[in-house]
Amino acid sequence: MGPTLILDDGGDATMLVHEGVVAERRGAVESDPVPGDRGYSHEKLVFLATLRASIAADPRRFTRLAETIEGVSEETTTGVHRLAQLAASGDLLFPAINVNDSVTKSKFDNRYGIRHSLPDGLNRATDVLIGGKVAFVVGYGDVGKGAAESLRGQGARVVVSEIDPICALQAAMDGYQVARLADVIGQVDFVITTTGNVAVVTAQDVLAMKDKAVLGNIGHFDNEIDMAGLEQVPGVTRTEIKPQVHEWTLPADVAPDGTERPERSVIVLSEGRLLNLGNATGHPSFVMSASFANQVLAQIELHVKADYLDVAEGATPDVHRLPKELDEKVARMHLAALGADLTELTKEQAEYIDVDVAGPYKSEHYRY
Ligand SMILES: NC(=O)c1ccc[n+]([C@@H]2O[C@H](COP(=O)([O-])OP(=O)(O)OC[C@H]3O[C@@H](n4cnc5c(N)ncnc54)[C@H](O)[C@@H]3O)[C@@H](O)[C@H]2O)c1
């Protein structure tokens, strides 16, 4: 018997099973994309090569696996996005629990974890002083909020870009300059991507960067910064300063506005992959303890087949969040280690605000 549960981070194992089933049904794996194609990345090539090798060795491996798997719990924003796409198209093969959107995951790991591990990565990689410099954070979601806060804490002047007006307004109200990357790129010393989106820093953006500026991604894949596009720039060279730290020398050229630009270079961290993992040791264990407690609870829910995971006759599986009671339980379990004393509701207060003394204390749509 094969595995019955997947515990995923980024959706790779889940996608391998789903795309494996499709490829086995078709008897072939899709052809490799080339630089410039939608979805091209080094990871995608490795993914497709893995599928090809699997089908050659065992043409029904993923079909069998999909039959025994009872569900998946997913750790991160990008993986949840992929699950949501599969559920929307009716192609999700088993129920999924979105661990990322437990409050005790995304509002803690994505924010407070990044607040620790972003400066850790920058310092270990470069030891460049952050104070007094200009730092640009692309995206102001949970990861962007932690990134901007940590850079400001180091004394940087932080500029944020957003495509979502709510997050852009939050950034402005938090006191950050909100600007488009292209408008200020020539003045910034650090560019950090936090979006989980594709090509938010293009090769043209890199060409416009200040000499010796530092560029890093703490969002997701190496296509968030268009690394494949950067490699294609004529005359560009890459020198390894130390593992995971590369100086990309850009040839003298003429900018789109006609200005002549001399030879210059930018420092790219972790080859465009997650810099807090490549240049440092990721998040500290305490914040990951909250994330992994959610994962353990989600795996138990899948194993015992909690009622809300049932798939109705004729319906397709869906993506669920953990019940709020369990989210509160994770937080409750971490309070004592920080010396935090929780106030207990009186029965009268609980009735007044219409909750149970034991929780949950907030409605599902409360945003924290
Ligand atoms: N490095 C790590 O350790 C770590 C930890 C947690 C999450 N992540 C990853 O970080 C990424 C972001 O996670 P999150 O929880 O902050 O997600 P989120 O959805 O809360 O935030 C992403 C933000 O990026 C914005 N955005 C999208 N495209 C943009 C663009 N072109 N320009 C500017 N802003 C843009 C969105 O509007 C959104 O506000 C995900 O890929 C997630 O998987 C990484």
Image: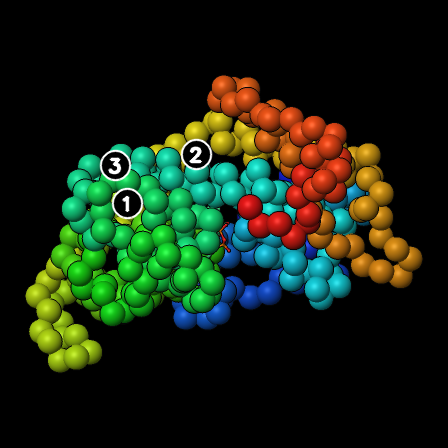
Q: Residues within 10 Å of mark 2 (few under 14, many from 20)?
A: many
Name the residue carrying label 1.
152
- Along the viewing direction, whichever of 336 and 87 lies nearer the viewer: 336
Say which amino acid is labelled 2. Answer: His
Rendered residue at 70%/42% (across/down): 353
Q: Residue furthest right?
A: 313
In this rendering, would 241 be left or right of 278? left
Name the residue carrying label 2.
283
Rendered residue at 23%/65% (across/down): 184
Quick one: label 2 or label 3, which is nearer the N terminus? 3
Determine whether 71 is above or below 45 in the image.
above
Please name the colour scheme applied to the rendered image.
rainbow
Name the residue carrying label 3.
123
Report x, y in % for residue 283.
43, 34
Determine whether 188 is above or below 297 in the image.
below
Quick one: label 1 or label 3, which is nearer the N terminus? 3
